[in-house]
Amino acid sequence: MLFSVIIPVYNRPQEVDELLDSLTKQTYPHFETLIVEDGSENRCKDIVEKYREQLNIRYYYKKNSGQGFSRNFGFERAEGDYLVVFDSDCLIPPHYFETVNQYLERDPVDAYGGPDRAHADFTPVQKAISYAMTSPLTTGGIRGNKRHAGTFHPRSFNMGISRQVYEETGGYRITRMGEDIEFSIRIIDSGFKTALIENAYVYHKRRTNLTQFFKQLHFFGRARINISRFYPDQIKIVHLLPVMFTLGVLFFCSLPLWSLWLFEKLLVPFLAYFALIFVHSSYKHQRISIGLLSMATAFIQLTAYGIGFLKEWWVKLRE
């Protein structure tokens, strides 16, 4: 089986360098790599040239159109049986394609996704961000594990589709703001079989500071409302939990102004929740500092998503 790896990139040559280096270490060699430069000013063409002798790689430069349509650009030019999408800020462990190939030979599916993890070399902030996005104690952790609810919806940071899926669906219909969610819904609605391959994980660097992380999650919240413009039934209770948390925080912060007694009563469960996050993350990473940072990233993960959701919901109401 030949895999075609499609990597859209925008002004991130250093990330592409690290990603391509990880691909040179794959134990399964039957894959090609397509780098799609999406109108970048800071191009990665020279980085790609470094790997000509180590990888079956092609480089394309195109006018900026967003990550969704850049992936379609790669799909159109790919030669593989399976079309695999990675975000440029991922590192791929050596066993990845061997794991996927073995799974597909044993249990063929039309589309798959894998989880993300924190690499040992990540900064403490990156590890804390990864924790917030994968922990069972936050809504970020509801995906990418075998206990996910309902049919598994692959996400484009780590996703593979058969050539038939692309030919019948036409790829991405929107290019930003929830494009991978819309695509996954359409894949499933078209009758294709999806699966989570747990050991086909990637190391996802995501954002490098808390401000960037807030902006990213704020955008994710807006994206969920954008998806509801296409699929009104795709607002689930789990998507409302960050909104409820955000509104609860606003209510909690207002309590001292009019009910100190109620503030004191609610303070205990609020602190207990974040204490649990601190203990769990500290134990998982064996570092108290990451446990402390994880309390901040979990708070941001919930409130930034909730704020973005409410903001775009208000926009939608006024349309």
Image (cartoon, rainbow, N blue to C red):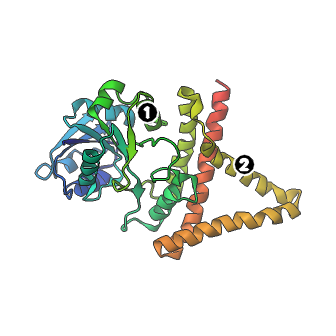
Q: Is residue 219 above or below residue 97?
A: above
Alpha-carbon distance for marks 2 and 1?
33 Å
User: Can residue 205 be seen from the camera position used here?
Assistant: no
Percent from the top left, x then y, of residue 182? 46, 33
Q: Which residue is mark 2?
A: 247
Q: Nearer the viewer, residue 62 or 23?
A: 23
Within 10 Å of disc 2 (Cα), the crowding (few <14, some 14-19, many 20+) is: some
Q: Is residue 1 above or below residue 136?
A: above
Which part of the image, by quadrant, shows the N terminus? Answer: top left
Identity, as a three-letter code, of the amino acid under mark 1 = Ile
Q: Which residue is mark 1?
A: 188
Percent from the top left, x then y, of residue 181? 47, 37
| SS of the residue under disc 2 | helix
Identity, as a three-letter code, of the amino acid under mark 2 = Leu
Percent from the top left, x then y, of residue 28? 19, 53
The answer to which quarter of the image holds residue 65 is top left
Q: Image point 45% across, 51% down: which residue?
A: 144
User: Can residue 85 be seen from the camera position used here?
Assistant: yes
Does 313 sit left or right of 286 as displayed?
A: right
The answer to which quarter of the image holds residue 294 is bottom right
The answer to which quarter of the image holds residue 179 is top left
